[in-house]
Image (cartoon, rainbow, N blue to C red):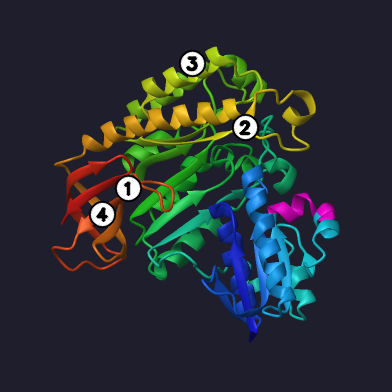
Amino acid sequence: MRRNKIDIISLGCSKNLVDSEHLIAQLIAAGYTVEHNPSHIDGEIVVVNTCGFIQDAQEESINTILELGEAKRQGRIRQLMVMGCLSERFMAELTQELPEVDRFYGKFSWKQMLADLGKSYRDDLASERYLTTPPHYAYMKISEGCNRFCAFCAIPLITGRHKSVPMEQLVAEARNLASRGVKELNVIAQDLSSYGLDLTGKMMLPELVEQLAAVEGIEWIRLHYAYPTQFPWDLLPVMARHDNVCNYLDIALQHISNKVLANMRRHITRDETLELIHRLRREVPGIHLRTTLMVGFPGEGESEFQELMDFVREARFERMGAFAYSEEAGTWAANNLSDDIPQDVKNDRLQQLMDLQEEISMEIQQAKVGKTMKVIVDREEEEYYVGRSEHDSPEVDPEVLIAKTAALTPGRFYNVKITEALPFELMATV
């Protein structure tokens, strides 16, 4: 056990990761040695930044806490602290059920955590971050919370109403990151589309992206988690105009059936969704769309599921993830709808959907063979250099495996020729 060392474990999404990075900066300033997601826990204090979004994520958080609780009983750590979305949502229950945890904190209770450690929170470091990603890319969280209140989603119960980070603060952060060698900004929010509404009464995402694109040194800007309803159309000419704004958009659509969309309280129709996709592809040529879909939501019969399968065949998303509905306490769906679709039916539909997407992905990938693409190299492995194109977000999207025919440097851009396609990877040479 290393004295004065804190190990931080981040679970869940990249938004959680940004929170951990801000906390690490405060802890380092307070005099601690901090390690993020260590392969071996050896700090006297461990902080778990939990995820509380869906049941699987909650279970992962609980299991991690239980394992660390056992390490504490064995004397391998001295203090165990838990923060983040799960403890924000279920603070009272967790306090009763997990006595091995010394202290629970909400999602942003960093000042209290530092005070409990006998340290002070430094307001002058509020925008500082310790990057846990490779030095050439970073995530930028532009807002917190959500005002959409979809029937299935617990995020507003956890993070509260939508709150945008002021634009000048984000531009300053981008300049700071660029000065530290960051070349790729992955812009994230629970609801990208609503950025600025709470500050100015209008959607300011197009203006923000315009300003970020002007930051010297930033070569790629990638946009994640737009909301389809009331989409900020002025964003599209900005994307088309700037070479350093990636032809990529992550926009969760969830479903296509009017019946299911209404039950989900998504405030969008099938026809509006199709028009959105057509317009995105028309106004930003070459755009790669990533979406997330849900199966097994109350009201999804076999005909609604087949409608979803037909939609995926038609839309041909370059990137797609999916999950089965799980009822979340306190949501509109949990209070008003019956979760009456058997789990085995949900699992079967999920498998069918992902099998279909694998076929589509393979066809899209094969069309890239023989083409030259600009990639950034993330790391070197034994047999390949591993890179990504502008269409590939870190951690979730396909990678480009580059043959070792020349020495490449992680963090630099190269032009490569695609030689072979796999469903979720491309093979290439420089």
Residue at the spot of label 2: 325
| Vertical relation: 224 (above or below) 404 | above
Looking at the image, tell me whether mark 4 or mark 1 is earlier in sequence order. Answer: 1
Q: Residue at x 27, y 66 (%)?
A: 382
Residue 57: where, in percent of width, then height?
62, 48
Residue at the spot of label 1: 390
Residue at the spot of label 4: 401
Residue 270: where, in percent of width, then height?
51, 17
Q: Given the image, on which type of amino acid does mark 2 rest? A: Tyr
- Could you tell me how far apart the alpha carbons at marks 4 and 1 are, in whole angstroms? 15 Å
Residue 371: where, in percent of width, then height?
16, 42
Check if residue 50 falls in the magenta segment: no
Nearer to us in this view, 235 or 352 = 352
Q: Given the image, on which type of amino acid does mark 1 rest? A: Glu
Q: Given the image, on which type of amino acid does mark 4 rest? A: Leu
Secondary structure, mark 4, is: strand
Determine whether, in the image, residue 234 is placed left or right of residue 8.
Answer: left
The quadrant of the picture occupied by the N terminus is bottom right
Q: Are marks 1 and 3 in contact (CB under 8 Å)?
A: no
- Could you tell me how far apart the alpha carbons at marks 2 and 4 are, in whole angstroms? 34 Å
Nearer to us in this view, 302 or 31 = 302
Q: Main secondary structure of the magenta part?
A: helix
Mark 2 residue crowding within 10 angstroms, few (<14) / some (14–19) / many (20+) = many
Mark 4 residue crowding within 10 angstroms, few (<14) / some (14–19) / many (20+) = many
Looking at the image, tell me whether mark 3 or mark 2 is earlier in sequence order. Answer: 3
- Could you tell me how far apart the alpha carbons at marks 3 and 2 are, in whole angstroms? 17 Å
Residue at the spot of label 3: 307
Looking at the image, tell me whether mark 1 or mark 3 is earlier in sequence order. Answer: 3
